[in-house]
Image (cartoon, coloured by chain):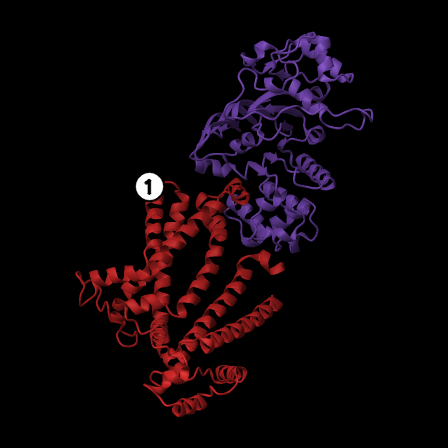
Amino acid sequence: MTPLLEVDDLRVEFATEDGVVHAVDGVSLAVEEGRTLGIVGESGSGKSVTGLSVMGLTRGRNATISGQARFDGMDLVGMADHELRSVRGNDVAMVFQDPLSSLHPYYTVGGQLVEAYRTHHPGAGRGESRDRAAEMLGLVGIPDAQDRLDSHPHEFSGGMRQRAMIAMALINEPRLLIADEPTTALDVTVQAQILELIQRLQSELGMAVIMITHDLGVVAELADDVAVMYAGRIVEHGPKTTIFDAPEHPYTWGLLGSIPRLTAPRDEELVPIPGRPPSLINRPSGCSFHPRCPYVRPAHTEVEPSLEPISADPAHRVACLLAEPARRKLWGQLRQGASPQDAREAVLGAEVPS
Amino acid sequence: MGRYIIRRTLWVVLLLLIVSAVTFLIFYLLPTGDPAALRAGKSPSPGQLAAIRHTLGLDKPVYEQYWIFMKKIVLHFDFGYSYQNSQPVRDEIFQRLPATASLTIGAVVVWLLIGLPIGVISAIRSRSFFDRLSMGGALLAISAPVYWLGLVGLYLFSNDIGIVHVFDGAGSYTPLSENPGRWFGSLLLPWLVLAASFAAFYARLLRSNLIEVMSQDYIRTARAKGLPERRVIWRHGMRSAITPIVTILGLDIGILLGGAILTETVFNIPGIGRYAYEAIINTDLPVIQGTVLFGAFFIVVANLIVDIAYAFLDPRVRYS
């Protein structure tokens, strides 16, 4: 089956006064119809820029974008602006993080939905478009949809605003929805409702979803496949169960070790990943993760890893310089509750990394 | 909305009362101008002064004087009579209002026509050659004082002393009712001079507003909807960027309707500003009070209109 969206070697660079920011550096991924891809990573890992670039929303004077994003036979990256506009909001739609700042404060919610509909249905009349907007608000669970059309965004609660954003994104029945941290700005209870809503609409409308998030819980809930991004690159990619059960990249281990689990013993300590995400202007040499990696070897500061399938499972790809057997042993140790230091000593020997 | 307007209107009344009291007191307490001495002519006898004080009501206590002063203004819109020529100040102001209004409205049109397009283009093509050139020019226009610009304009273009004669009637004001062509010719130069700094200021303001708005999340949303860039700029960007400008415009119009003193004086336009200028030169207290209060009235009313307009322009204000 050919994927609905196939991103190939996407690179996005921004020229700034401090230097060139390599926001996305050779990302390749694919989403099939009706499936959900979760993209996880810390802030600044390039996950949002990847999503925005697929929509052409990072285009600008200071941006250099290369690579391909094939959607339904068209290359979204190389496409002219006016052609891309007929795809945006129509075949591919996007939902953003903060629904209050993402809706225009001066226009009614209904007006903004109608605008989204009429942009891609030029023949639609006022009444028809309004009915469609009300139908969408109803579909996302806003009561008294017909009346709420005339409300302004500030009259809605946070969760309602995000529902309205989703209604606006889906009003033209897109085949792909890119959701960029759609629940980050919301209360936990509302988060769950919004995720449920996206899931329900996905199965009703049969669309593909790219869920961009820093929250592994969201990914566990929604995704079929997971791409873990670090410093503008995908460092691990595979089916969700594989990523959660048998992760192979130390960064993924770190992410999993830093979230609380209900099933874990109560006294289990959360292990944060030390350090901070690297600068995307002067990235570390070799493996970008090496300054924060507990298992780093001297050679890792010089050689760049590439995203390779592991021998046991071609669908599971990892960009790590550690040997496969060592990775598996390390994960085995960590899984039994060993600290990263203990795991390193047990598997790699007591030597201190230089 | 109704409550909001009522609240704002009451506030306006209070504000005008305060302005009137301050104006009254300042001139009453002013050491230079004993009104009676000003009125009496050269070396009056103490008896004459006392008689004049009595006719003007200056021998009454201050609060009583203020009360009479306010009663006349509120009931009859009567600011008293000029010390200089004994003409009623109210009539003189109304006579001069058309000239001031002509100057103001024309200048507003000119500065909007020049400033707004430059602001928009500079914002959309920020850091381009056009942007740098026009923003540099704007800085010059803001820095050039209006009296200097006016004198240069007169020197170059006026009908009598000017070097180039392009505007028919430049340098001497002609009322619109008398001769529309000459009215236009006589005001074109003052319009341009008065509008220069405003156009520059509005261009810079709109540019920075629009640049800021265009980086907002809701602009990204508009683009994500697939809207043409023109619609993103005009319907989504400008809608937000222009709102603060509308409010400033209201205030500027209010201020100028109270008299553009420098421009009217340089170009010899018989408006309220020039009237005020002459009154200040002659320490003509009723005229000063009248023009100050009249000016304050326009500013305060403009403020009120702006506040109400803002509530219509920004739906978030209505509910707070």
Pinpoint residue A272: horizontal percent, then vertical percent. Answer: 69, 25
Q: Residue at x 60, y 22 (%)?
A: A1
Q: Which residue is most to the right?
A: A266
Q: Which amino acid does label 1 sit on?
A: Phe
Q: In which quarter of the view is residue A52 placed? A: top right
Q: How many marks?
A: 1
Q: Relative to B225, does residue A72 appear above or below in the rendering? A: above
Q: What element carries label 1?
A: helix
Q: In which quarter of the view is residue B9 placed? A: bottom right
Q: Which residue is labeled 1 in the image? A: B129
Pinpoint residue B1: horizontal percent, then vertical percent. Answer: 60, 65
Depth check, front residue: A77 or B65 = B65
Pinpoint residue A280: horizontal percent, then vertical percent. Answer: 52, 26
* A116 lies left or right of A182: left
Q: Which residue is drawn at 74% across and 41% down?
A: A189
Q: Relative to A311, does residue A272 appear above or below in the rendering? A: below
Whether residue B82 appears in this view of the structure is: no
Q: Residue at x 68, y 12 (%)?
A: A327
Chain in red in the render: B
Chain in purple in the render: A
Whether residue A188 appears in this view of the structure is: yes
Marked residue chain, label 1: B
Q: Quadrant of the C terminus of chain B?
A: bottom right
Q: Relative to B15, does residue A252 appear above or below in the rendering? A: above
